[in-house]
């Protein structure tokens, strides 16, 4: 159970780490000062959540690894985030599309994780939910603004949603660690979130005058450590300081 709990924590935390890195890379590049600051704050929120998860993971591991080691010194195949969060910032529509598609899931997930028998995970979820509630409002507003905006913004937003859609189904796949934690009353059965997720997403897309993608082909692999070509470049940037100057601390 110990190894599965450790992997379960990583499966949650790695999503926020990688998405936080993506959003943090936008600092100074937002379309306006207010939006730039908002994206930076979302990144900081996610990294704050990540620290809580990795500190707990280090405690569960029970060896000499620290939160920094877990965050920065794993190889690509050891990260268990979904493919969605590692997709690049092709343009601002992709950034908001990626954020929105994850935020809807993240909010539903944390709402259920609050009920976990693991009091540490429950506490992290309760604290994080307040932040993720804002994240979801922010990204939802931008989906509506771009989708129901100009012809150009609608086209870009639709293209982003079409391209990112293929990564959404993986959110609801269960790993062996997921299944054991659900059986123990610790984890969330993500398969039960799927219907509510796609209904919420569909409602927002329709309100935004965007078309719900019809594609039935979905990509997966991130939860097993099999990532897209973008992940290696992201980790090279994320891990550079820690590997160049060993034993640094956040």
Image (spheres, grey):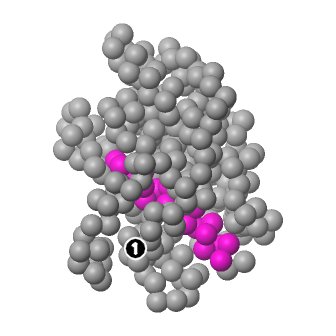
- From the top left corner, tell me how far across and down residue 63 is, in percent: 52, 89
Q: Nearer the viewer, residue 169 or 184?
A: 169
In this rendering, is residue 215 above or below 101? above
Is 179 a magenta residue?
A: no
Question: Does residue 224 show up?
Answer: yes
- From the top left corner, tell me how far across and down residue 40 is, in percent: 29, 49
Tell me which residue sits at (27%, 67%) in the image. 240
Question: Does residue 128 show up?
Answer: no
Look at the numbered disc 1 and give the secondary structure of its residue. Answer: loop
Tell me which residue sits at (40%, 16%) in the image. 155
Tell me which residue sits at (24%, 37%) in the image. 30
Which residue is label 1 attached to?
A: 73
Number of marks drawn? 1
Q: Main SS type for the magenta part?
A: helix
Tell me which residue sits at (57%, 83%) in the image. 61
Q: Nearer the viewer, residue 135 or 214?
A: 214
The quarter of the image holding the C terminus is bottom left
- Which stretch appears magenta? 3-23
């Amino acid at each position: 159970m110990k190894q599965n709990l450790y992997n379960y924590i990583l499966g949650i935390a790695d999503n926020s780490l990688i998405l936080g890195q993506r959003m943090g890379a936008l600092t100074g590049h937002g379309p306006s000062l207010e939006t730039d600051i908002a994206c930076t704050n979302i990144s900081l929120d996610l990294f704050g959540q990540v620290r809580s998860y990795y500190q707990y993971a280090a405690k569960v591991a029970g060896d000499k690894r620290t939160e920094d080691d877990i965050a920065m010194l794993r190889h690509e195949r050891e990260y268990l985030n979904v493919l969605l969060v590692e997709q690049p910032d092709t343009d601002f529509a992709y950034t908001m599309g990626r954020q929105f598609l994850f935020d809807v899931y993240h909010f539903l997930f944390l709402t259920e994780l609050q009920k976990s028998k693991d009091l540490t995970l429950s506490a992290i979820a309760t604290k994080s939910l307040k932040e993720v509630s804002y994240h979801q409002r922010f990204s939802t507003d931008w989906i509506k603004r771009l989708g129901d905006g100009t012809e150009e913004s609608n086209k870009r937003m639709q293209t982003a949603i079409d391209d990112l859609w293929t990564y959404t189904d993986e959110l609801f796949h269960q790993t062996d660690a997921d299944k054991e934690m659900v059986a123990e009353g610790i984890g969330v059965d993500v398969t039960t979130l799927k219907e509510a997720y796609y209904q919420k997403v569909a409602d927002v897309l329709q309100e935004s005058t965007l078309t719900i993608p019809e594609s039935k082909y979905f990509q997966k692999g991130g939860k097993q450590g099999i990532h897209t070509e973008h992940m290696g470049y992201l980790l090279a940037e994320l891990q550079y300081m820690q590997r160049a100057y060993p034993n640094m601390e956040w």
